[in-house]
Image (cartoon, rainbow, N blue to C red):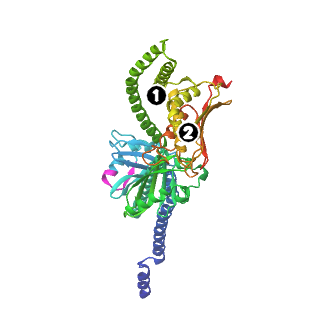
Amino acid sequence: MLERQIMIERLTGVQSSKRSYYTELKNTVAQLQKKNMQLEIIHEVMKNLNVEMSMDDMLKNIMDKLITIFPFDRISLSVRNGEELILSNVYPKKLGYLPRNVTLSKEHSLYWQVIEKGKMHYHKVPQEAAENEYIENQIFRVNGIQSALLFPLHSKGIITGIVSIGSLGILSYDESDLTFLQQLADQFAVCLENVRLYNEVLSRKKEWEDTFRAVVDMIFVVDLEGDIVKVNEQAIQYFRSYGNQLVGKKIDEVFHEAKDISALLSESLQTKQASHREIRLSDHRIFETFSNPVFNEEQQMYGFILYMKDVSEKKRIESQLIHSGKLAAIGELAAGVAHELNNPLTAILGNSQILVRDAKLEPAAHNLLVGITNCGKRCRNIVQNLLTFSRQEEYLFQECSLNEAVDQVVSLVGYQIEMQNITIAVKKDESLPRINGSLQQLGQIVLNFLLNAKDALEPDIVREKQILIKTSHNHEWVQLTVSDTGVGISASHQSEVFHPFFTTKPAGQGTGLGLSVSLGIAQAHGGLIEMTSLEGEGSTFMLRLPKNQAERR
């Protein structure tokens, strides 16, 4: 019998002398079951808590599990933020006295005292209010709480808050219960820290995405294989034909007409540094494009950020400013020349007109003097037109006629063009209505059209050298057409002729600004320029300007 008792004691750890070992064994099994249940609760609570769950749901989850082995009636969470302690959540909500997010003062605060000591605390609520008592006692009494266990939340050596477990009666517990509850509180603290970090990352991600979407220029995030990983709203708007299918496309597929994009990315890949190029897309828009390599924490490159800023309008304005500067210089020169010519022209015209009146002159001499007078008048008109045309600062919009602009330009350069064996035919519609515009600016368009036509007729291969200037109108537009029988423009260049600084002329013979400036002037007048050209046969440029509203009716 003794040997049997010893064997049972060794197997069970229960001394069975003077009492039944079955009772002791039952108690031990109950303790083990309680331990297992506690472990299961910690496991289940932590498994079910996730960063996307609300704090109220977290507290409900803990209470629903914990109440099966540890009866209580209220659980609350107070979160520490620096030197502030904020009562953030209470479950059940009906057992709440203070509003959420209220800050608990340090003075006479039981919660702050627990934080400062860094240990759990059992608190029995006095039934009667006392002077200078804990402020939490008022909350407890209003809710009928008679006792509470307070557990500090430890995270990375810092107390981040307090979990309070309250009961409408007197809580009963032992040391193992306290150990378990503190372990549960520590696990909950880890979960809260994860939630904080997750929300911080989420907040920064949202800020980054909001900034990414708000940028008015196009942004593409591209991996090393050339696949588009992310784009902003501006890029989606520009490439509407792809809809929301830009992500996943190859960058070469999207920018198939812009070879410079691939070269730009290759340069960044090789140098591991930012690269920059000016890229022209198929719709004639010019983009200042930057390729910035992206690195991970190990400084390994894993992609690019492609930033594209539309500078088309900037380029147009720059080209117009350059052209305006040249015209200003021409204007100053013309003013000086006119001043120098007007004095001798006045003498020539005055003296020739006086001599013509002499009745004694022979017919031959009279005819010579009349010729001198006429040439003087022609020189005076040329000087006057040159001054009028070069006065580019007078951009006042007023009623004017395209026919008048044609007359000024033809009188200015028509003779020089015809001296190159080029025939100029002018067909003006005498019923052409007047429009609201700048005569000087419209003359600039006519001049650019005429000079381009002249240049297209200069090569020796052109046999029949003719320029036709025609004005007309319809219900909506007043139109100027300049046609030539020159060399024409190749199909590959036709989409680029209006780009600033694009020219097919030899170096030193063209700036590539004429048509670009002309287009800007036309658009400023609410009009447009159309072009048709056949290589080897000639070109036609048409300026369309809107009629005045009164003329349309």
Where does the C terminus fall, quadrant-wise? top right
Q: Which residue is mark 2?
A: 422
The image shows residue 528 at horizontal and vertical percentages of 58, 36
Q: Which residue is mark 1?
A: 386
Secondary element under disc 1, as helix, strand or loop, is helix
The type of residue carrying mark 2 is: Ile
Q: Residue at x 64, y 25 (%)?
A: 430
Work out whether residue 161 or residue 113 is closer to the camera in this orientation and state it: 161
Three-letter amino acid code of the residue under disc 1: Leu
Estimate the x, y position of residue 230 in percent, counting from the top left.
51, 55
* Magenta segment boundaries in residue numbering: 115-124
Residue found 54% across the figure and 38% down from its top:
449
Is residue 98 visible in this depiction of the protein? no
Residue in the picture at 63% in, 24% down: 433
Q: Nearer the viewer, residue 153 or 299?
A: 299
Residue 119 part of the magenta-drawn span: yes
For the residue labelled by badge 2, is the local secondary structure a helix, a strand or a loop?
A: loop
Q: Quadrant of the N terminus?
A: bottom left
Q: Are marks 1 and 2 in contact (CB under 8 Å)?
A: no
Earlier along the polypeptide chain: callout 1 or callout 2? 1
| Up-down relation of residue 469 to residue 495 (above or below) | above
Tag 2: Cα neighbours inside 10 Å, few (<14), some, or many (≥20)?
Answer: many
For residue 120, which numbered disc appears in the image? none
- Asked whether 169 falls inside the magenta stretch, the response is no
Q: Is residue 300 above or below residue 84?
A: below
- Direction from residue 127 to residue 453 in the image, left or right: right
* Residue 28: image location, x then y, percent: 45, 72
